[in-house]
Structures are given as C-alpha cells and as structure tokens.
Image: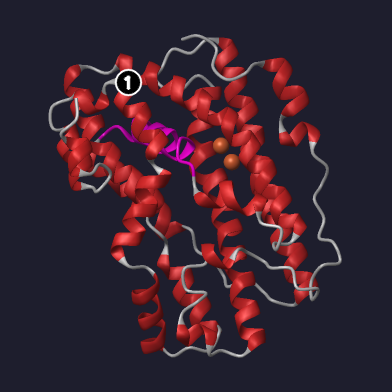
Amino acid sequence: MTSAGSGERDWYTRAGVRRDPRRLLRDELGAGQLYFPPDLIPYAGHPLVLALPEPAREALAARHLFQYLGFTTHFETEVVNRATQRIATGRSGVDTPAETRLDAFRIYCDEGYHALYSFDVIRQIADASGVEPVPYDFAPFRERLDAVGVEALPGQPVLAQLLQVVVFETLVTAILNDVPKDPRVLTVVRRIVRDHARDEGWHHAFFARFFQELWARQSPAERVRVARCLPGLVRSSLLPDLRPVRAALTVAGLGAAQVEEVVRDSYPRAATERAMREAARHALRLFEETGVLAVDGARDAFLTAGLLTESEGDGP
Ligand SMILES: [Fe+2]
Ligand SMILES: [Fe+2]
C-alpha cells in the first residue's frame, strides 16, 4: 500500500506530542468557568439534578469530564494502540511498506500522548478542586466491543481489532468539535480537546486508507462477514457507557430509583440514535465509497443497526 497520512515532515513539526507544551490548569476554578459544556452532559438539566445542592452539581460536571478523559486514556492505550502496534510492527495481516509502518508508530506515539494528557488533566483538576474521580473500570466496555468481533468474525481477533480502530478513528464526536469552541469551559480542557482533535484529523486519513487496503485483501466471503460486523462495532463504540453515569449520580446523592429516572429521561433512544448517526457519518461515507454497502446484506445490517435511515437505505 502507499504511504498513508501526511508524512514525516509534517508529523515532526505538527503532531501535538512534538509541538504542544504541557497544558496546565490556570487559576480558573471558582471563577465561573465550567468543567464541561452543559449541553454535552445529557443529564445536566434534569429536574432531579437541578434540585441537588450547587457543590454536588459542580462535582457531577467535574466527574463527567473525568469520565470522558478516563475513557480516552483507556481507549487509546487498550484499543487504538493494541491495533496500531500491529500495523507498526508489521503484524496486521496487511502487507504494509516501511513508510506506512513509520506512520503507525507516529500514531502510536500520538495516542500514548493523548492518554498521558487526559490522565494528567484529571489529576490536575482533581487535586485543585478536591473532587476525586469515581473509580472507572474500562473492562466491561472493552469486552462489549470485543464481543462484537468474536461473534461476527470468529477466529479472526486481529481483523476485528483493526476494524474497531478503523471505525473509531473515523468517527467524529460532538465533543471534539464543540468543546474547544466553548469559551465558558476551563482553558486547559478546551486546549487538550483542541490538541487532540488536530491529531485525529491526520489519523482519520491514515485509517481511511488503511481500511481501503484491508478491504481490498478480503475474499468475497470475508467481505460479507466484515460488512455485517461493522454496524455492531459502530454501535458499541458510540452508545453511551451508562455505568459511570450511574456511579456519578449515586455519589452526587441520588437514590437508586432517582438514578434510573435520570438515566431513562436523559438518554432517550431517539436522541441517542441521532447522535450516533451524526458521529458515524464520515465512517459511513468511507464504507459507501469503499464498496462495503454494496455487499450482500450490508445495507440491511446498517439499516437494522439504525445507522442508515430508510431513505438512505433505498439509495444507490
Ligand atoms: Fe487519540
Ligand atoms: Fe487517533
């Protein structure tokens, strides 16, 4: 395959890990700056949450940020770099030239750095605010993601891991887009999300090309399996992980029944599905262009998963 990404010269001068300083919390706590945009915290406006005392609501917002950063720390190291190191070390099953492997090592460094500063900012804010993160166990999320691959691609764990990363690296979430633009949010948070989004634009191009190469190597029978696996991977990457939400609401002082009420009201199915489709639109375009959706049964699988609407499903 040809070299993916924007090449050596750009990375050494433009990657966040090469260029950006350590981002430090300014003296903004208590000055009215927010931990996270309230419109990106689905339960922030729920009456039961609004009825909590102010310090508990503040801590909830901090813990929402911690949960996002904690998820990022784990996802980068345990999922993205699990597959990226296979490409980098020439064990992906795709015959990659040295330049592509070098790019994969660069991405490996990027993702390690994203994990580092996500954890760094959790600690800076926790130490300064006194709000400790709720302990976060990433294993159930990773196991749910891995289960999709085990079921749809039995005996091909590496292929499933590569597809997980292609899917995740071509998703565009509202957080990466919106947090850096929100002047109400703590500067350190806006900075690291902006730093992260810049690197991800480059990763997106790399993994889109990698996927085209991977797809070209699959037999017709494998393509059917891959195409039917992808919707489940998109869904399991994007559906909100509600365990840490419940834990944070409980620590904030809500009882079990109230926690369930807040979760039920704050994550309505239609809105969750809409947000998922929105975040997946670039991935869907890649699958369309690569020919994934032309495979027998693929369009139906994406329709059933709620990733295409009926009108798109009838398309060419
Ligand atoms: Fe990243
Ligand atoms: Fe990435």
Give left or right: position of 243 versus 54.
left
Residue at 45% x, 25% y is 208
Query: What is the chief secondary structure element of the magenta stretch?
Result: helix
The yes-or-no answer for disc 1 within 8 Å of ligand 2 is no
Residue 15: image location, x then y, percent:
71, 30
Q: Is residue 145 above or below residue 221?
A: below
Residue at 47% x, 71% y is 245
Magenta stretch, residue numbers = 155-172
Q: Is residue 65 visible?
A: yes
Which residue position is annotated with label 1? 290
Residue furthest front as drawn: 311
Residue 68: image location, x then y, percent:
56, 59
Give left or right: position of 170 versus 215.
right
Residue 248: image location, x then y, percent:
53, 76
> Which colour assignment does the render follow?
secondary structure
Q: Is residue 135 above or below residue 193?
A: below
Could you say which is closer to the camera, residue 247 or residue 234?
A: 234
Tag 1: residue type?
Thr
Give left or right: position of 294 versus 248.
left
Residue at 61% x, 72% y is 61
